[in-house]
Amino acid sequence: MPPTVLFFGSWLLWFLGSLLYMKMKYGFLGAGQMGEALFAGMLRQGKACPADVHIAEVNHARAEAMREKYGVTVADACAVVASADLVVLATKPQDMEALLKALPSDGVRGKLFVSIAAGKSLATLEALLPEARVVRVMPNLPMRVGEGMSCFCRGTGVTEADVEAVQMLLGCSGRVREMPETQFDAVTALSGSGPAFVAVIAQAFVDGAVAQGMSAEDARALTLQTLRGTATVLAEGGVPLKEFVEQVTSKGGTTAAGRGVLEGSGMAEIIAQTLKAAADRSRELGNGK
């Protein structure tokens, strides 16, 4: 097949897919930071228009702020679900059961629900939404700036078209990866809680530089750009982590001197224990503890 035909065919599929997404109606039960990041990402990238986004938010001041900022429609939870093809569950986990039980079954039937509530398993969600299709997502805070890492797993009856819609939704705010639910406690520890752990390490860099006579402002700027630049090189260059470390370490140089301290400090074991503690707590929360 000629390259021109292949190009046109690919473009046509993309265009038709875009039209499909634009025709979808999106409902958000909860419009906190994560919920806002998701619909703001779609609006920013033109995957949805304000009229296609309806939100229900118990904080009336917050709901009004979202309406004024984005032009989205604010309504009660039942009206939001009734109007939507895809419903994002972005409420607090402890409020989820009461909210879903209050929804009329005829409004839920046949809908796609995407839950970003921490600790709520597919089994729990499907028991609360027996006539709907459910996808569970573990997002993280960098979604707010379009650099999130979202992992999802699909429930019973979820179609490939559903998966494409979920990938589009999440992809507007960062990277997306499908993973088995059995790994979600580890996902929660690594990418869900990870931004806080990285910030703790970043603060240690800042404090260490200040101890060497640098101003706090300069230390923060250098630290953040070093983290950003290193992450970009690793993400785009495809170089294995250990190989990268060796590439930037000269024998007898400054990096080698610092590595000697860092690698001899038990830092790797401390991070492993940190992730284990977070994953263990995720399991406890999932079991209602």
Image: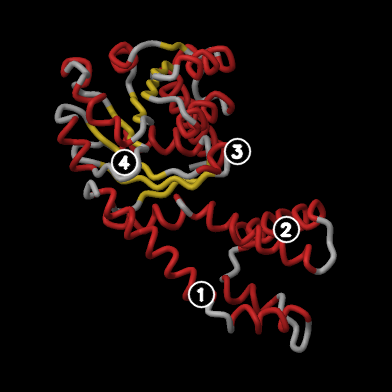
First in residue order: circle 3 vs circle 4: 4
Q: Are marks 3 and 2 in contact (CB under 8 Å)?
A: no
Are discs 3 and 4 less than 8 Å apart at CB?
no
Give the alpha-carbon distance from disc 4 to disc 1, as whole Å. Answer: 30 Å
Task: Tell me the number on the disc at residue 223.
Answer: 2
Instruction: From the image, tell me which residue sits under label 3.
Output: 145
Question: Label 3 vs label 2: CA separation?
Answer: 19 Å
Label 4 element class = strand
Q: In the displayed structure, does residue 230 sit left or right of residue 172?
A: right
Say what secondary structure mark 1 lies in. Answer: helix
Q: Nearer the viewer, residue 249 or 96?
A: 96
Disc 4 residue type (three-letter): Arg
User: Badge 3: how crowded within 10 Å, few (<14), some, or many (20+)?
Assistant: few
Q: Which mark sits nearer the N-terminus, 4 or 2?
A: 4
Question: Position of 275 compared to 231: left or right?
Answer: left
* Disc nearer the start of the sequence (4/1): 4
> Which of these two is toward me, 233 or 288?
288
Q: Which residue is mark 4?
A: 136
Q: Do the numbered discs 4 and 1 sit on residues whose CB atoms are within 8 Å?
A: no
The amino acid type of the residue labelled 2 equals Thr
- Amino acid bearing label 1: Ala
The x and y percentages for residue 147 are 57, 44
Kind of residue at disc 3: Val
Residue drawn at x 23%, y 26% as measured from the top left: 98
Residue 127 on image: x %, y %: 15, 35
Decide: is 140 above or below 227.
Answer: above
The reply to whether callout 1 and callout 2 are in contact (CB within 8 Å) is: no
- Near mark 2 (Cα within 10 A), the count class, few <14, some 14-19 or many ≥20, is some
Task: List x then y, in percent, for residue 96.
Answer: 28, 31
Vertical side of 12 occupied by 68: above or below? above
